[in-house]
Image (cartoon, grey):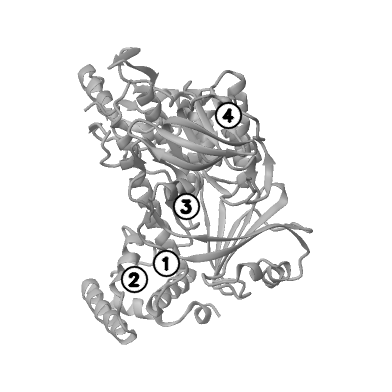
Amino acid sequence: MIHDRYQLAFKLYPYERSTDQDAATPVRHPVVVMGGGPIGVATALDLGLQGIPVVVLDDHEGIGQGSRAICFAKRSLEIADRYGCGQPMLDKGVVWNLGKVFHDDRKVFEFNLLPEEGHKFPAFINLQQPYFERFIVERVREAQAAGAPIELRGKNRVDNVTVHDDHVTLEITTPDGPYTIEADWLIGCDGASSPLRGMMGLDFEGRVFEDSFLIADIKMVNDDFPTERWFWFEPYFKSGASTLLHKQPDGVWRVDFQIGWDVDRKKELQEENVRARLDAMLGDVEYEIVWTSIYTFQCRRMKKFRHGRVIFAGDAAHQVSPFGARGANSGMQDVDNLGWKLGMVIDGKAPDSLLDSYDWERIHGADENILNSTRSTDFITPKSKVSHMFRNAVLDLAEQYEFARPLVNSGRLSVPCVYDGGPLNGPDALPGGPARTRVGSPCPDAPLKGGFLLDHLGGTFTLLTIDAEAPDALEEAGVPVTRLALSASDDASGALAERYLGEAKSGVYLIRPDQHVATRWENFDETATGAALRRAIGLE
Amino acid sequence: MADLTLTPNLDRPDDFYAALIAAHDGLSDDESAALNARLILILANQIGNIDVLNAALQAAAKPAEEATA
């Protein structure tokens, strides 16, 4: 039997009997994804849109309740947009720019994210995770209707895996009993407590950091709070060591109370105890509790994300503290990084070793996220008397003097990882080129006539030329490269030139299918472009 | 005359703060206080100018609550 471990917000992939269950011998699939959360379904969408058959297995029939990840960063929206589901997220999400930081009963300072002009997507939206997942699943349904070979199998619980050199065997339990399938590649997107990791005897490494958050989604009867991020250090209302208040769609507010590691979960989740914390914080305000949960976290990662034919992504591979919104957002970057590489390997266009660069690049990303979120955690919950003294000195000085504000760390908000020094990087040969578009960077957006730059990048290799000559089509090692020919004058605002030329007069960028810069030069050179492309697909 | 800088001037604030806290790892309260004293004297020597140092002493003298009361 398969029991539900949680209640569903949306039932989106009800159990249906598959013909695989009646097959005499186990059916082999090119790719099987374990876990139907945002990372697993996005992985299936990326591969399916490339025409690669993929089966997603999940032990539930849809999306769990609760706001959970809540903050989605620009890069995640850009990735979702490449898959065709960024716009509904933006339409539904709440955009915020103003943040206020409090210590005890005093406002320390406020900050404005001051969004840069000329991007299709804002720095952040707040959106309950079930919506984020639903928009991805809805896009899968649309892609399926157009022929994308994606299957979502609900109430399919993987109970055992056997890993071979060239495939994986999966034993699955369903409401109709067990069956077995095989996969050329198995992608583990089965979350922080990843059963797959356990079945393979793999575990996390690194710093274990323990704390708990009591999370409450509430609806206030008289809702006149502004759309701002409010963060308290050691709040006067004593409802937690720190408290975060954030607005979400549907008039729902998210409150996070940091309540320490050693807590009685059942007792803390009793409504009267949740209300006691909320009442102390909100005063005489009427509200309805929509959802509550206790969340614990650890900052650590697997030593390697790739284990032969099994590849881990998202929370299954790495975990961070919630400060900075670096969990789901880094998982989306995993998907972005893995999709095109696995696609090219399966299509025989790139060697198997290209997948080792997924390991290098995403471990680089995970380490950056773990470093930042660990530092935020240390600032928010100082672990020694002297650390606490410095923290409070920073907060005290920040109220009076601007210099101390950059030291206040209530979370360093997720920005996409730059693959500096990565194994696929070609030369950075654009003298005077901006640092933000250096080799390894994700391409920043820029406005173009009738749209945005990122609308034209991704999915394939692109040669972006700005005021430079180059052939309109290229091919190297059987991989086509499409040219995007632009001029600095295509963007009257000057953002394109500022972001891609800097002091240079012209620029030629080779851009990967995940919109990261593979290499850049001042002028086109066919031999150099060919060599850079071969390097970017793991041939050199 | 040199002025006290009270606008952001640290190259990499998070790296500095992490290094500062790490320097105190494993120290007793007295050892930490002594480390802080040595550090202040080293940084004061780096600054050098007595007007700047006097302005810094004054800026640090009162917590925000009293300074803004």
Residue closest to the eye, A433 or B58: A433
Residue labelled with disc 4: A21
Whether residues under marks 1 and 2 lie with C-beta atoms below 8 angstroms apart, the answer is: yes
Residue A440 shows in the view: no
Q: Residue at x 35, y 76 (%)?
A: B56
Residue at the spot of label 1: A378
Q: Estimate the x, y position of residue B63 in percent, counting from the top left.
A: 47, 80
Q: Nearer the viewer, residue B58 or A162?
A: A162
Chain letter, disc 1 residue:
A
Pinpoint the chain carrying mark 4: A
Co-location on one chain, circles 3 and 1: yes
Residue drawn at 27 percent across, 34 percent down: A425
Q: CA distance from mark 4 to mark 3?
A: 45 Å
Q: Nearer the viewer, mark 2 or mark 4?
A: 4
**Mark 2 residue element:** helix
Amino acid, disc 3: Leu
Label 3, label 2: how many angstroms apart (C-alpha)?
22 Å
**Is A208 situated left or right of A179 in this image?**
left
